[in-house]
Amino acid sequence: MSDIQKIQDEAVAGILAAADERSLEDARIAYLGKKGTLAGASAGMRNIPNEEKPAFGAALNKARQAITTALDEKTKHLQELADKASVAGIDLTLPGRSLPTGGLHPITIIQDRAIQILRRMGFALADGPEIETEYHCFDALNTPKDHPARNEKDTFYFDSGKLLRTQTSSVQIRTMENSTPPVRIIAPGSAYRRDDVDATHLPVFNQLEGLYVDKDVKLGDLKGTLEYFLQAMFGDDTEVRFRPHFFPFTEPSFEIDVKLHAKGQAPKWIEVAGCGMVDPAVFSNISGERKDDIFDPEKVTGYAFGMGLERLAMIQWGIKDIRALIENDTRFLSKF
Ligand code: DAH
């Protein structure tokens, strides 16, 4: 019994003396291992009288427990020392290194918001090609052959006769070719014009087109929808004005202005979109192509609108120069 106490004392002392994990492991094997001292002592159980065996067993258990506890504590202690050593010389009060995360481009932010509002109002997303036929971009939209927008100075043409769409309005045509009223769609996407780059023009820009065709769609529906939309975008008290205008594919047509209150400037009206009631000639073109009468101008009416997303972004954030939106200067982009 006193041997066991001695083994225990020696083992605990040895464990306390271990200077690193390696020697601690050596100690564990030496004391608790299969061929360790404690195992040796247990083997002695055979040689003692039966009545002493329980006390002997209890002493063995106590020793094993004491040694295990000492091992656990020493392991913890060594780990703490290692942790401390690994941060030695590091100033934990220094600010961390920031990991730059990406962000959404302002045009994407505006587009997402516009889509969110319009989807809530029941518009579904539609899509169309950016390389278009003259038919979809102009003819079907009732644009006469001699319209200035069709000029090679204004439109990018391919040798094939196809072109880079100058407006997302072509998606109106493609949608009506393949659907039945009611049609209620929005189509965001790029449009292309041969413009020289300046503070308000880019040869590639983004539009968001809308089309609603049904029985009895009225001008009041168009006004209410766009007024609501612009107020949802820019604030409930945003003033909106409809100015008569001309587009080949709508009649009557309007340009829509919102009143901008820039800091330190007199409020002014800024054009944000074009819109109007779909011209019956457009419905006739669709009917002729489809060879049916479900878009018969006698049966359906509709409204359409189209807006420039760069313009909306410039209004939203007071951006003065449209070029900031394509220069990829992170000092600008990180503000959004
Ligand atoms: N497509 C016109 C443009 O690019 C914008 C527009 C005006 C679209 C009136 C429409 C509309 O759908 O009804 O300037």
Image (tube, rainbow, N blue to C red):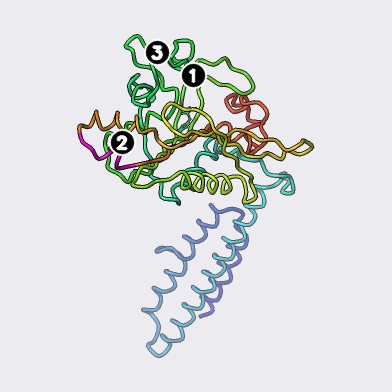
User: Which of marks 3 and 1 precedes in the sequence?
Assistant: 3
Tell me residue 135's x, y (percent): 32, 21
Q: Nearer the viewer, residue 120 or 261?
A: 261
What residue occupies the far bottom of the structure in this picture? 51
User: How many angstroms separate mark 2 from mark 1 (CA)?
Assistant: 25 Å
Q: What residue would you read off at disc 2?
A: 176
Q: What residue would you read off at disc 3?
A: 157
What residue occupies the far right of the structure in this picture? 264
> What secondary structure is the stretch in magenta mostly built from?
loop
* Rendered image: mark on residue 193: 1
Residue 122 located left or right of residue 24:
left
Instruction: Indicate the secondary structure of the residue bearing disc 3.
Output: loop
Range of the magenta residues?
Answer: 292-300
Please, what is the three-letter code of the amino acid marked with disc 1? Arg
| Quarter residue 292 falls in | top left
Residue beneath the point at 30% across and 28% down? 285
User: Which of marks 1 and 2 precedes in the sequence?
Assistant: 2
| Quarter residue 162 falls in | top left
Please, what is the three-letter code of the amino acid marked with disc 2? Met
Residue beneath the point at 53% across and 52% down? 22
| Quarter residue 151 falls in | top left
Instruction: Indicate the secondary structure of the residue bearing disc 1.
Output: loop
User: How many angstroms separate mark 3 from mark 2 (CA)?
Assistant: 25 Å
Tell me residue 94's x, y (percent): 74, 45
